[in-house]
Image (spheres, grey):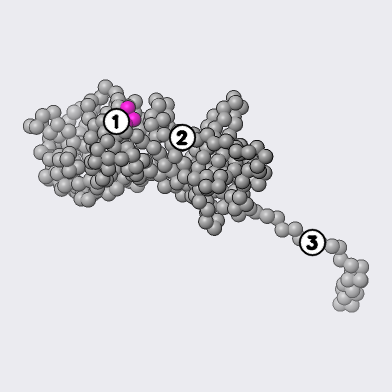
């Protein structure tokens, strides 16, 4: 059983008494009553850091890019990091691609073609580059070669000098010298400054992506009943019914009681303007990294690092420097326009009119 937002993230539950005085009527502003449809999300992480440092911005386009020449050409302008799976090595894999991580995670997926470049080394004298190419749903391949790339981890940059990567057949181990791409240039990631504080806010749009891929609505009634409905991209619908009220300091409280007796109380700061309602939901990001949690499934990982280590590797931060991780999702709702029936007042025609009409017809 999950309240509506638990479809996406583990909620930081805040328990607030229904009313300080049971004789008081709950505050249920008329402006909040109605049906609200989710229209937009803005998701981020509040990351605590022990030290001031600089991290890589995995969701933004790089300051510079690497060019891939071939059929077709591509610009590798985005970077993302895959932390190692359990037993699969010590460090994260850094991947350069021509599509943003946001686009990769969208409901429809990224636009083709997709180019993904990885580099690695066995020793300073044995370095290699690997390029995965998907041109269409049926056309793609893998390209590789030894390389003399220069990776500057302190500046989040990678330089390739006209490396020629040849098509490789993993079944035979043979390379085809007639099929290749040339990779050249310097990629430098955009960066994010982290202060020694608990309030470093960084964009993490994937937290809100599943909400936008589905359909979500909240219905708040004047008598205090709240109904939340979430339909995911596969058409599965989850409905929760509870009670709602608002506090004097603009916090919307929703209380859901489930069949097994579990009670969840959610406190969400809100703002209202015209026909738009904005709710802000805070959660414990690391609760999502239980083995069967949705976010872990998305990365398809059995993580070798605890949650804080995962964050450090994702943003290329110093080891053991992250102290907290709170998810924050601003959800914007628009008020649905209820379809109202307009009653048409009808009365039978008068006898006088009927007589007049009959005369007209007979005299034609």
**From this viewpoint, which residue is outermost toward the top?**
87
222 shown above or below 2: below
Seen from the viewer's position, the closer of residues 53 and 87 is 53
Badge 1: how crowded within 10 Å, few (<14), some, or many (20+)? some
* Label 3, label 1: how far apart the Cα atoms are: 69 Å
For the point 52% across and 37% down, the residue is 266
Q: Nearer the viewer, mark 2 or mark 1?
A: 2
Q: Which disc, if any, is residue 12? A: 2
Earlier-in-chain disc, 3 versus 2: 2
Provide residue 120's location: percent of width, then percent of height: 17, 33
Badge 3: how crowded within 10 Å, few (<14), some, or many (20+)? few
Picture quarter with the C terminus: bottom right
**Dividing the picture into quarters, in which one does residue 352 lie?**
bottom right
Residue 196 magenta-highlighted: no
Residue position marked by numbered label 3 in the rendering: 345
Residue position marked by numbered label 1 in the rendering: 309
* Label 3, label 2: how far apart the Cα atoms are: 53 Å
Q: Which residues are magenta?
A: 306-310
For the point 29% across and 30% down, the residue is 309
339 shown above or below 25: below
């Amino acid at each position: 059983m999950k309240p509506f937002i638990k479809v996406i993230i583990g909620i930081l539950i805040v328990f607030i008494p229904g009313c300080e005085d049971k004789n008081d009527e709950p505050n249920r502003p008329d402006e909040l009553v109605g049906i609200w449809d989710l229209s937009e999300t803005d998701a981020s992480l509040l990351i605590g850091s022990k030290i001031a440092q600089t991290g890589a911005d995995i969701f933004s386009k790089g300051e510079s890019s690497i060019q891939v020449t071939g059929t077709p050409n591509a610009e590798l302008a985005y970077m993302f990091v895959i932390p190692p799976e359990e037993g699969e090595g010590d460090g994260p894999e850094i991947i350069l691609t021509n599509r943003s991580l946001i686009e990769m995670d969208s409901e429809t997926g990224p636009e083709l073609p997709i180019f993904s470049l990885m580099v690695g080394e066995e020793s300073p004298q044995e370095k290699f580059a690997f390029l995965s190419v998907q041109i269409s749903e049926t056309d793609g391949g893998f390209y590789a070669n030894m390389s003399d790339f220069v990776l500057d981890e302190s500046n989040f940059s990678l330089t390739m000098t006209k490396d020629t990567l040849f098509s490789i057949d993993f079944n035979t181990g043979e390379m085809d010298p007639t099929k290749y791409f040339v990779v050249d240039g310097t990629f430098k990631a955009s960066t994010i400054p982290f202060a020694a504080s608990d309030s470093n806010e960084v964009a993490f749009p994937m937290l809100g992506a599943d909400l936008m891929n589905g359909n979500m609505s909240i219905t708040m009634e004047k008598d205090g009943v709240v109904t939340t409905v979430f339909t995911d991209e596969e058409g599965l619908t989850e409905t929760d019914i509870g009670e709602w009220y608002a506090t004097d300091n603009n916090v919307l409280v929703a209380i859901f009681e489930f069949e097994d007796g579990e009670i969840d109380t959610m406190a969400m700061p809100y703002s209202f303007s015209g026909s738009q309602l904005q709710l802000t939901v805070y959660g414990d990001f690391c609760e999502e990294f239980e083995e069967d949690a949705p976010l872990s499934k998305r990365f398809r990982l059995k993580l070798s690092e605890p949650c804080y280590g995962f964050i450090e590797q994702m943003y290329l931060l110093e080891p053991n420097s992250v102290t907290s991780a709170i998810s924050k999702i601003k959800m914007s709702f628009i008020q649905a326009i209820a379809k109202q029936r307009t009653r048409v007042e009808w009365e039978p025609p008068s006898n006088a009119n009927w007589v007049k009409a009959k005369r007209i017809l007979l005299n034609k």
